[in-house]
Structures are given as C-alpha cells and as structure tokens.
Image (cartoon, helix red, strand yellow):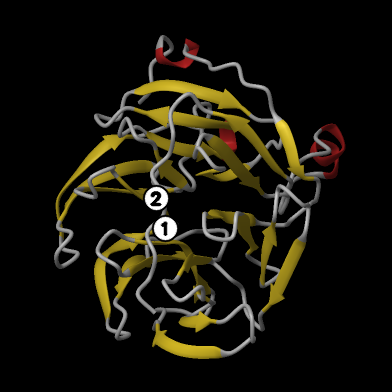
Amino acid sequence: ICTREERRTKMTRQITTVVAARYPVGECPTWDERRGWLLWTSITEGTIHALDPQSGARHEWRFNSSVGAFGLCDSGRFVVALKDSVIVFDPETGDIEPLAQIEHPIEKMRLNDGKVGPDGAFWIGSLDDRPSKEPIAALYRVSADGKVSTITDGLKVSNGLAWSVDGKTMYHSDSRGPWIDAWDFDLADGAASNRRRIAEPDDATGRPDGGATDLENHYWSAGPSGSRVNRFAPDGSLVDYVDVPTLRPTMPCFGGADMKTVYVTSLSENVSAELLAQHPLCGSIVSFRSDVAGVPVTRFPA
C-alpha cells in the first residue's frame, strides 16, 4: 500500500487537451512513429482512431465488435483484439485476416488491455464484464501463427501490460485486484516466470489501469479512481504522479519525436451526470511532457 509520504511526490505538469471528446471507454493510446500518428480505441463503440498531431488529420475505423486493444504490425497493419477474437486489419484496404479465437468461460466477457511484447507476440487479457467482476478472466499470449497460450488466470480485469527497456521484465495488473505484478521475461520464447507482487495501490492512489514504461525502467500506471497517472519505481514504490483533469484516466503512452510526450486516454462510462458536468474533459485525451523518454512499442510480425 502506498504511504502518505509517497503521495506527496506530485509532479506539476502543463496539461494539453489533445482530443476534446467524451469517449465511453477511451483506451490503448499507441504512438506510430512511422506515420507520426497517435492511435487509440473507443472500446465499447468498436472503433480505432488516429490523429496526426502535426496536421490535425483524423482517421477512424469501425468494427462489428468491441475493440479491447490493438498493436502495430511490421507491415503497417494492426493486430486487433475484438470481443473474443484476434484479427490482423489493414487500415488502407479494410481487409481483415482472422488470427485467433479466445474461448471465454461466460458470454458476459470481452478482451481488454493488450500489447505486442518484445518477443513479437500479441499479449492480451480479458475481463468479467459484469458489475460483480468475478475472478474468471485470464492473460493470453497470441503468437504470429495464431497459437494461443494461457499465461495466468483467476483475474478480474486484466490490465497494465508493459515491458522494461531491455524487455526482461513484464509488468501486468488487475484493476480490481487491485495489484501490479512484475514477471521475469524471456525474449526468445516469451516465457514469463518469477511472478511477484510489487504494488497494491488503493483507491486514493488509483486502481491500476493501462500502463507504459520509460527509459529509466519506471512503470507509469493510469489510476482512474485517483484521477491521476502514477509513476512507480521497478520495486513498486510510488515516486511521482500527475493529476489529470479527465477524472477517469485509463492508459498512458509515450510519443512524439523525442518520445517525451505522455498521451492519456480516459473514460466517461458509468460516471454520474453531476461529475460529468464538473469535469468537461472526462472521456477526452490529454497530454503532458515527461523529463524521461518512453520505451517504444514493439511491432507484430505480420
């Protein structure tokens, strides 16, 4: 549990509104360094969006399913997690290539947070989509040939995937645990071992949602219940945090030419009308500058 002393380490950052919107569940901000795009998903609306911050040009792709997460491919395509399947999608042509099917224990579940790991596989978790949030979700590894491996189960809301600079440590969280775990990671075969709990953030600190890492091997975690983005040291101690005006931040990512711009998505779903009126940026995307650059995303070999 984070101590009161740790909570005093607040970073003051100028917050910039990137996209003024009210996404129900804005998630998975991803920086495409080739195109110079910021991409994100509106999970429950089943859309992936792109913004060119330089020109202001926007793109949108719509799917017949929720879109829990996505990653970039070597080919320029996207690897996309729908409700219960993973596909490879071509944003230029709209072509879809089925890759893998995920068998959920019950109907009221969907795929959630995911990233392409340094092993080249697509790592994707699931969640119990009911209010009760029972521990029936899991974390999966999907290889380029479509093979699905279950890494761990007994989760409520799988979240927070990110890797250290050298790729040898994987971070993973459960938003309803709530906890953040670290694993030893083998880049050669994607084996995750030596799982250990490094933090159990409370509601005031912010239950852990989406995550990212910086070049100092610190782990940044969106804390929607605390309306902030937390920065944890590798041992799980909270060293910094940034308050954000979006009320319910969901995930940070690093981007920009120097990888020092932190983009943060947020959600507005299940937020009261009173709170929405008080927080007009709830559901929007904001950014702030970091003193440390972030770890670039890995691409899926497809």
Label 1: which secondary element:
loop
Residue 143 in percent (x, y) is at 29, 77
Label 2: which secondary element:
strand
Q: Earlier in the sequence, mark 1 or mark 2?
A: 1
In the image, is residue 32 above or below residue 235? below
Residues tagged 1 and 2 counted as in contact (Cβ below 8 A) = yes
Q: Identify the amino acid type marked 1.
A: Lys
In the picture, measured across the screen, residue 285 lies left or right of residue 95, that is right
Residue 183 in percent (x, y) is at 20, 49
Which residue: 60% across, 42% down? 263
Which label is found at residue 174?
A: 2
In the image, is residue 29 above or below residue 220? below
Q: Quadrant of residue 1?
A: top left
Q: Quadrant of the C terminus?
A: bottom left
Q: Residue 211, can we see it?
A: yes
Q: Quadrant of residue 142?
A: bottom left
Which residue: 64% across, 36% down? 287
Callout 2: 10 Å neighbours few (<14), some, many (20+)? many
Q: Quadrant of residue 116?
A: bottom left
Residue under label 1: 156
Residue 291 in percent (x, y) is at 48, 23
Q: Residue 227, can we see it?
A: no
